[in-house]
Amino acid sequence: MKRWLLLIIGVQAFTSCAYVQTHKNVEEAFCRYEGASIAKQPELYRAGDRYLIAAERCELSKHYPVIHDTVFFDENNEPKFHVEQNSGEKVYYPVSAGTALVLQRSDGYAALPILRDELQRQVPLQHLPSGARLCDVRAEIAETDLTNAGLTAGPRDPQSLPLWLRALSQTEEVIIDWPATLGYNCAIPIMAPFVFFHRFLSEE
């Protein structure tokens, strides 16, 4: 009977919405990403009929939340990038004419995460085209957490993890993450009333 009970609890833990994922950070500790950082007040350039936004090249690391929980922490489950080193060099991302127009309007409004998502889909230029001129950015830029808001990230280096690192990650997952996931999910029914009342009182 006890074996069946443990089996049921284990299945519930690993099919639930919450799990511990520190093994992913073990992998990421040995990896870096080539990225770029957009300034809080973006630099906008016009070159002919094209618009470009400047960004500073940087080296990024990636970090996952220790616990992925779509019930209690539904707004904090995505990995975040952190700047490890700034290069001081600039690259220039093409941006749509519509976005450029909004940025130049005094009644315009922009948010760095939305701007970042647009730039992320573009291939940056290493140098400004000849004759490019700086445009005035008059739009209001939304206040936001700059930890991740203005960062674009390229491919991971190394793209393919070495065998020893995969083995280390899998060992850590079995020894630490699986037992911690089981314990966390068993504690969810106990934590739920406290979390509910805390949020209820905070909203009041």
Image (cartoon, rainbow, N blue to C red):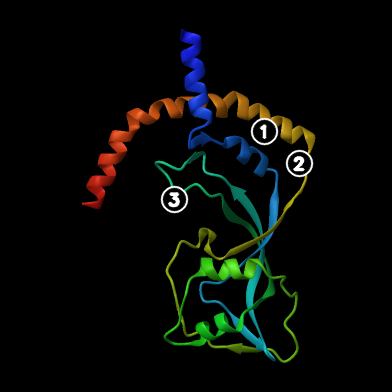
Tag 1–tag 2 contact (CB < 8 Å): yes
1 or 3: tag closer to the N-terminus:
3
State which tag comes first along the sequence, 3 or 2: 3
Secondary structure, mark 2, is loop
How crowded pointer 3 is (Cα within 10 Å; few <14, some 14-19, many 20+) is rated as few
Mark 3 lies on a secondary structure that is loop
Q: Nearer the viewer, residue 174 or 1?
A: 1
Measuring from the top left, give residue 134's x and y in whole percent.
61, 88
Q: Which residue is mark 2?
A: 161
Dot 2 surroundings within 10 Å: few (below 14), some, or many (20 or more)? Answer: some
Label 3 sits on residue: 75
Q: CA distance from mark 1 to mark 3?
A: 26 Å
Give the Cα distance between marks 3 and 2: 29 Å
Quote the CA–CA distance across marks 1 and 2. 10 Å
Compare residues 174 and 18 and report the one nearer the observer.
18
161, above or below 173, in the image: below
Q: Which residue is mark 1?
A: 169
Q: Label 3 sits on what residue type? A: Glu
- Going from N to C along the chain, the mark reached first, 1 or 2, is 2
Which residue is at 52% across, 17% downward?
7
User: Is residue 114 depicted above or below 183 in this figure?
Assistant: below
Give the side of residue 30 with respect to residue 180, left or right: right
Q: Which is more foreground, mark 3 or mark 2?
A: 3
Residue type at mark 1 is Ser
Local SS, label 1: helix
In this image, 24 relative to 184: left or right?
right
Which residue type does callout 2 highlight? Leu
Q: Residue furthest top?
A: 1
- Depicted 38 relative to depicted 52: above or below: above
- CB atoms at circles 1 and 3 under 8 Å apart? no
**Which residue is drawn at the image coordinates 48% and 19% (left, top)?**
8
